[in-house]
Every structure is written in C-alpha cells, then in structure tokens.
Image (cartoon, coloured by chain):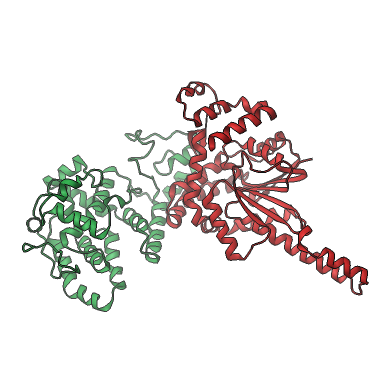
Chain colours: A green, B red
C-alpha cells in the first residue's frame, strides 16, 4: 500500500480517514477511526503494532540505519531497520512458508520461542548432539535468552509481522544449526547465511558492513572458507523459518542439518571443542 | 509512605479547602491502602479518570505512567529536546529568564525542574547581573574613602546576595541526570535538588520569591492542586511563572505544527531514544492541555493576581505569569 507522496499530503490536508497516523488525526478532527477487523487492538493489528505512514517508515529506515552504524550495540535500531525495509522479502518468505507443509503449520499455529514456552528441564535431559540440548548449551554458554528479542512494531500486516518475529526468534537456533558462536565473525557468517536465505535488506546490509569490523586474519578466514560456505548453504538450504523446531528438540543435530541441506561448518570457531559432531 | 502522605494531605485539605474533599480524597486514601471495597464510590463521580495523552486512564495510574515515561527518557531528555525543537527550546527558556529578570539574592523554586535547565540559567543570570552591579559600583567609586572601602568589604561576602535555586522534581532519574549536568558544568553553590510532587510540595509556606514550572505542568494530574501549592510556597510579592506548550492560533502554522508533531517527533523518539510511545504521549499531552486564556483563568482562580501571558513562536509555547499579593 505504497501511495505516492502528493497523495499522502493530500490525505493529511483533507483530514481523511486514511489508515496511517489515524488515531492522532482522528482525534484532532473529531473523527473516530474505523477499520475492518482491527477493533481488537484499538486500531492496531497486533499488540505491539505502531501504525506508520510511508514517510515515517522512510525516516525510520534512514535514521535507524545511521544509528545502527554509529552504535552497533543498538539492537533495537537494527530491528527497526529490518522492519521498515523488509516488506518485499517478508512477502517472499511468507510465500515460501506457505508452499511448505511444515511452514504452513507454523503460520497457522504461530509458535513462539520464549523461555515461558520452553520446557528447560526436559531439554537439558536430552542426549548430547540433539537440537534441544545443543540449543540450551548455546544459550547458557553465550548467556543469552530468547526473550531478549524485541517485538515487531512497524510491519503493517499481521501475518508478515509474525514472519518477522519468527525470523528473529530463529536467529539463535541458526547459530546452533550452523555451529557459529556469537562473536563478530560468527555473527557475520550467520548474517551471510541469512542474507542468502531471506534476502532481507537488513541482513544484506549487515553482511556487507559487518566484515569491515573484522581483523585481517578473521577477514581472511571469512573470505576464504566461512563466507562461501555460508552463502552456499544459505541458497541451497530449505527455508529455515519453515522448520517446526519446537517439535524437533530430540532430533539429532547432524541429521537435521542433512535434512535441511546445510553443510557442516568448514572451521570450528569454538575455543573448546564443544562443537557437535557425530564423534562427541 | 504514599498512603500516609495521602492521609496527611487529606487532613490538611479538610482544614484548608473543603473543595478538595469533594474531589474524593477519601477514595484515594482507601484505594492506596488497597481496600477494594472502596471502589464502589468511584462509579458515578467524575475526576476518577483523566487523560494520558489521548487515552483515558484512572487518575491514580496517570502519575505512575508519567513517572515511567520520564524514567525511560531521562538519559536522552536533553538530546531529544534539541532534536525535536531544533534547539529553539533554549531560546524559549532564555526568554523566560528575561521576562523574569531576577535580581541577585532571590530564591527560586524550579518545579518539575528535572535536568535543571531553568535553574542553571537563573544562577547564571543572577551571577552575571551581580557582577555587572559590582562593576558599576566599582566604576562609580573611583576615589573611595576609607568608609567606602570598609562598607565594600562588608557587603562583598556572598551570603546576603547569593541567589539560591531549588530544583524539585517527582522523578529521581531526571534529578540524577540534572545533578550530573551540574557537576560537569561546575555549578556547586546555590543549587539544591529535592524530590517532590508538585501537587504536594515538601516546603513550608512563604518560602520562595519565584516559582517556575517549565514544560511540567501538563504532566500533573491535578493542575489546580499544583497552582494552589505554588501560591502557598511563594512569599507575598512572589511571582509564579509557567512555560508550557499551548495552542497555536494561526491555522497554517497549526497544520504544519501538527504534522511535524505527529509525524516526526515519535520517529525521532524511536531513533534517538528508542522509545516511540513516550514521545507519542508527549505530543498528545500537548493537545490535551488547556489554551492560553483557559489556563490564565485557572491561575486567577487559584488566587494569583495580575496574570498575563506571552506567546512565543506563534503560540507553540506560552509563558504565563502571576503574582501572589
């Protein structure tokens, strides 16, 4: 629903019942906002939704890009950049998911990976080498939690917002699947994989600018072996968002990789050999 | 502690102003103590819910919500002010000081003073005025007699002529940021920081020469109460000054201002401070605040005299001033 700029300004001046920024203008002009099917969240499509106009999205995209480049620790800015620029890629991802039976199930059931939905005791009781056990190990070693992912705010379609949220929550699982740590090199490798898989502009940008912060030796490693592997795996692998991880915790990691068409990593980046392989 | 303060306020209100009892203070005491049975009182009375931006919320919740907003924006408050107003807020605050024209030696209460902008300007203004007065005095005393010199020494100590500013804010995060600013700027004397509620100031009667509240009164749940408190703590002859966003009269400017407010400001809030909702609240709360004339009447109702207002930047902000006589 990208309307042209003149049309947008015309809408503001005519105080119309346009979709964007309605609550504010609606109260100013005394009109009540009505929209089909969104009475539940008072004009928003989902609880964390903030409706924005195309102009606002453009400014958000530019602003968040600059902020994220200046301070890479501002994960919220990276998230905003992804949401405001990822419309086409999200549509493509959603269509890929729809064409896959497991992906379809996910779109219907809408599972969320949060600490409250994970059964941690059961997962830690699983044998080594299974997805659940290795994922838990990854979370503990890197001291991260799946609950730290920001909620999607600026995507104006409820289903696409879920796809974006799923992408964020699957990111940590990707680290486990690919066997990459959370240091800069590991993150860049995962970003290259994601860029090849999803085509999200935020991933492409991260993949292009991330290597600039690497040391020479790591850059060499990236360019010679990790990078090509990540790109290859990314383009050949099955859509990682279409996998119902929550029902595969007890599946062996090597077998899962094989099923998803992901090659094992060419280099072990973990300091101790905690990397899962068949000879653990 | 909040419950006891509320109880204390209830009793002091009873003796001072019956009007406030009718605004259901009893319910506040009960509800603060968590007695759910009291909720039966609330149903048909107005004054139970109020606005939080464009939302309607129960009165008790508004103060908490406002607290949370300022707690989260405190760190980036000054940066955001510069970004949102393109630096013009500095001119507004300077104009407030020029209209105030404080003489050295006065006591200022800067309510909702937060990061201390008004207080710093006040101290700077009075210090430079004091220096100027000293220089003029020195110029006129080219050949002083011994008598003059001793008088000069006697009056030169900082005590009687020192201006003092008290920054009062309900939000401890904002005060913390303000204190750090003061330390960086090297301002140590004449400034105190007090945590307090504008509706219930922790000061005795007749204490201050000037009371200011800059961009704070629209966040107060009961504006009339804040005005009453202002009247109470001012000395007779004291001046009340309020700098606040107000209604723009020119329709074209109003449209531009609205578009800018609702389109740009939350976006800036998201990018710079990572908080869209707080800045959405900010622009909505501006729309909910009464216009210049209505606010002037509210100030007159509270008991101030010689009330006037000055519009700045086409009415985007207005400075209201009144005297306690």
> Which of the two residues, B68 or A188, is positioned nearer the viewer here?
B68
The answer to which quarter of the image holds residue A79 is: bottom left
Residue A43: x, y in percent?
38, 37
Q: Is B267 rendered above or below residue A229?
A: above
> Which of the two residues, B298 or B210, is positioned nearer the viewer here?
B210
Please identify the quadrant where the C terminus of chain B is shown.
top right
Left or right of B150? Residue A87 is: left
Residue B91: x, y in percent?
64, 58
Left or right of A63? Residue B104 is: right
Residue at 44% of width from left, 46% of height from top? B277
Residue B194: x, y in percent?
61, 49
Q: Is residue A15 visible?
A: no
Q: Is residue A151 visible?
A: yes
Left or right of B142? Residue A82 is: left
The answer to which quarter of the image holds residue B321 is: top right
Residue B184: x, y in percent?
57, 65
Residue at 41% of width from left, 41% of height from top? A18
The answer to which quarter of the image holds residue A74 is: bottom left
């Amino acid at each position: 629903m990208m309307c042209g700029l003149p049309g947008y300004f015309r809408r503001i001046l005519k105080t119309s019942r346009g979709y964007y920024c309605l609550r504010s203008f609606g109260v100013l002009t005394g009109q009540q906002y009505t929209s089909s099917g969104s009475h539940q969240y008072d004009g928003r499509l989902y609880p964390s939704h903030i409706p924005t106009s195309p102009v606002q999205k453009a400014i958000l995209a530019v602003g968040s890009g600059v902020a994220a480049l200046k301070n890479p620790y501002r994960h919220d800015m990276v998230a905003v950049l992804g949401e405001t620029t990822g419309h086409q890629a999200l549509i493509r991802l959603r269509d890929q998911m729809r064409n896959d039976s497991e992906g379809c199930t996910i779109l219907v059931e809408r599972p969320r990976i949060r600490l409250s939905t994970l059964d941690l005791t059961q997962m830690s009781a699983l044998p080594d080498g299974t997805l659940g056990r290795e994922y838990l190990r990854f979370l503990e070693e890197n001291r991260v939690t799946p609950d730290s992912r920001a909620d999607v705010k600026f995507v104006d379609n409820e289903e696409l917002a879920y796809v974006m949220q799923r992408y964020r929550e699957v990111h940590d699982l990707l680290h486990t699947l690919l066997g990459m740590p959370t240091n800069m090199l590991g993150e860049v490798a995962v970003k290259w994989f994601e860029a090849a898989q999803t085509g999200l502009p935020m991933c492409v940008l991260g993949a292009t600018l991330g290597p600039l912060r690497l040391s020479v030796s790591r850059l060499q490693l990236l360019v010679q072996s990790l990078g090509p592997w990540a790109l290859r795996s990314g383009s050949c692998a099955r859509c990682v968002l279409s996998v119902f991880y929550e029902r595969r915790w007890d599946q062996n990691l090597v077998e899962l990789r094989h099923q998803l068409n992901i090659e094992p990593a060419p280099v072990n980046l973990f300091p101790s050999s905690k990397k899962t392989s068949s000879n653990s | 502690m909040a419950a006891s303060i509320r109880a204390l306020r209830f009793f002091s209100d009873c003796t001072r102003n019956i009007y406030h009892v009718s605004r259901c203070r009893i319910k506040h005491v009960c509800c603060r103590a968590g007695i759910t049975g009291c909720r039966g009182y609330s149903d048909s009375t107005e004054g139970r819910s109020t606005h939080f931006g464009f939302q309607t919320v129960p009165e008790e919740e508004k103060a908490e919500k406002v607290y949370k907003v300022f707690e989260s924006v405190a760190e980036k408050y000054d940066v955001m002010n510069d970004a949102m107003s393109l630096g013009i807020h500095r001119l507004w605050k300077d104009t407030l000081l020029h209209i105030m024209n404080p003489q050295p030696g006065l006591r200022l209460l800067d309510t909702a003073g937060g990061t201390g902008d008004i207080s710093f300007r006040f101290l700077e203004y009075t210090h430079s005025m004091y220096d100027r007065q000293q220089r003029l005095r020195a110029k006129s005393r080219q050949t002083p007699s011994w008598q003059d010199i001793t008088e000069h020494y006697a009056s030169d100590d900082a005590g009687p002529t020192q201006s003092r500013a008290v920054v009062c804010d309900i939000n401890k995060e904002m005060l913390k940021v303000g204190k750090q600013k003061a330390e960086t700027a090297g301002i140590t004397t004449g400034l105190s920081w007090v945590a307090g509620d504008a509706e219930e100031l922790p000061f005795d009667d007749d204490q201050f020469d000037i009371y200011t509240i800059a961009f704070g009164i629209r966040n107060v749940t009961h504006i009339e109460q804040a005005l009453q408190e202002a009247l109470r703590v001012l000395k007779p002859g004291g001046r009340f000054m309020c700098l606040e966003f107000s209604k723009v009269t020119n329709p074209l400017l109003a449209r531009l201002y609205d578009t800018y407010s609702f389109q740009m400001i939350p976006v800036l809030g998201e990018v710079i401070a990572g908080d869209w909702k707080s800045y959405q609240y900010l622009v909505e709360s501006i729309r909910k605040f009464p216009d210049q004339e209505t606010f002037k009447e509210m100030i007159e109702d509270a008991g101030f005299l010689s009330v006037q207002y000055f519009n700045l930047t086409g009415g985007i902000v207005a400075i209201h001033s009144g005297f306690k006589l």
